[in-house]
Image (spheres, coloured by chain):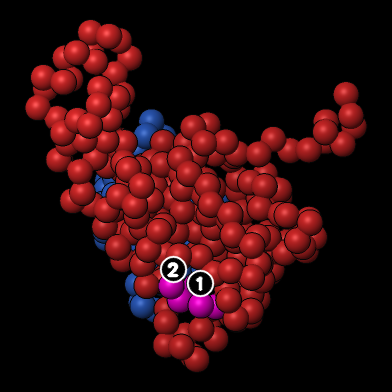
Amino acid sequence: MDANVAQSPSLPRIGEPAPHFEAETTHGTLRLSDFEGSWLILFSHPADFTPVCTTEFIAFAEIAPELSKRNVQLLGLSIDSTYSHIAWVRTIKEKFGVDIPFPIIADLNKEVATAYGMLMPGESKTETSRAVFVIDDKGVVRAMIYYPLTTGRNMDEILRLVDALQTSDEHGVATPAGWRPGDKVIVPPPRTVEDAEARMAAGYECQDWFFCKRAL
Amino acid sequence: MACVNPDGTISAVAGKVLLAADQGADERAMAEAAGVPVYRVRASLRELVQAGLLTQADGAWAVTDAGRAAAAQAAGAG
């Protein structure tokens, strides 16, 4: 086996348990298991005191109340010290009037960043990319988003993603492209000929046997 | 924002968690009492146990004498 391959950490995968961590944060030492029972958005940013990251932190703070209504907590991360995080959070409050309500991991040894595949050496060897991991209340990775250093993330899409995942869990359905709460949802395709026949008579809005929608 | 400071005093949140633990509250009730999310309560409980301010036996929390003193001091400071 190639030695480099053997040393590469296994990256998180959708549907598998999120890698355990215990990390120093701006809210004290936190473990992944501390968030059990809540959904968690673990996100990384390249560095403190940088402009795009500052706009993102303000935006994350703005959606924090909406996320809280959905039982979702936020947890940031970068390869900076706790002192740097504290200073940056205080600067954001002073210059922009925004409180950052969520903890930020000080991942100076890159332990969490490595476990979660947040480093993209082709882009930067010293900064984490703009990664987002949506982890459900049982500690399972449900979605991952990666953005490059140059491009700030879209909070509306993160909220939409959480809504879609929680709706799928609650109702056993899927959601179509661009779905928003209140829109019709996709009824999962039938797995047997019998089910295919049955669903045509089930009152769903069907274009064909495999493509049916319904209101919630 | 660690709940136990280097000088042995505890934060206001940790004090509220201790008081709630002393009254038999569960994690959610402690979170409500302290006005913080449950993950902060879990982290605080771990830290308070490590500092010898709180013990757990058979699932029940017990505040130590040192814990009561620290909670009283935190309440006074808050």
- Residue B3 point in image, percent of width and height: 49, 63
Q: Is residue A82 above or below residue A185?
A: below
Q: Nearer the viewer, residue A152 or A185?
A: A185
Q: Is residue A55 magenta?
A: yes
Colour of the chain lettered A: red
Q: SS at mark 2? A: helix
Q: Is residue A46 left or right of residue B5?
A: right
Going 18% across and 20% down the picture, which residue do you hit? A199
Q: Which chain is blue?
A: B
Chain letter for mark 1, please.
A
Q: Amino acid at mark 1?
A: Glu
Give percent across and percent down for residue A85: 60, 73
- Of residue A171 and residue B72, the one placed in the foreground of this image is A171
Read off the magenta span: A54-59
Q: Residue furthest bottom?
A: A95
Query: Helix, strand or loop at disc 1?
Result: helix
Identify which residue, A55 or A213, lies in the foreground: A213
Q: Which residue is mark 2?
A: A60
Q: Residue A208's spot in the image, x, y percent? A: 25, 26
Specify few, some or many for label 2: CA neighbours under 10 Å numbering under 14, 14-19, or 20 or more: many
Image position of A159 (left or right of A69): right
Q: Residue at x 83, y 31 (%)?
A: A6
Chain of the residue on which disc 2 is drawn: A
Res. A56 mark: 1
How much space separates mark 1 and mark 2, taking CA atoms? Answer: 6 Å
Q: How many marks?
A: 2
Picture residue at 71% right of the left edge, 54% below the top: A119
What residue sits 51% from the left and 83% below the top?
A92
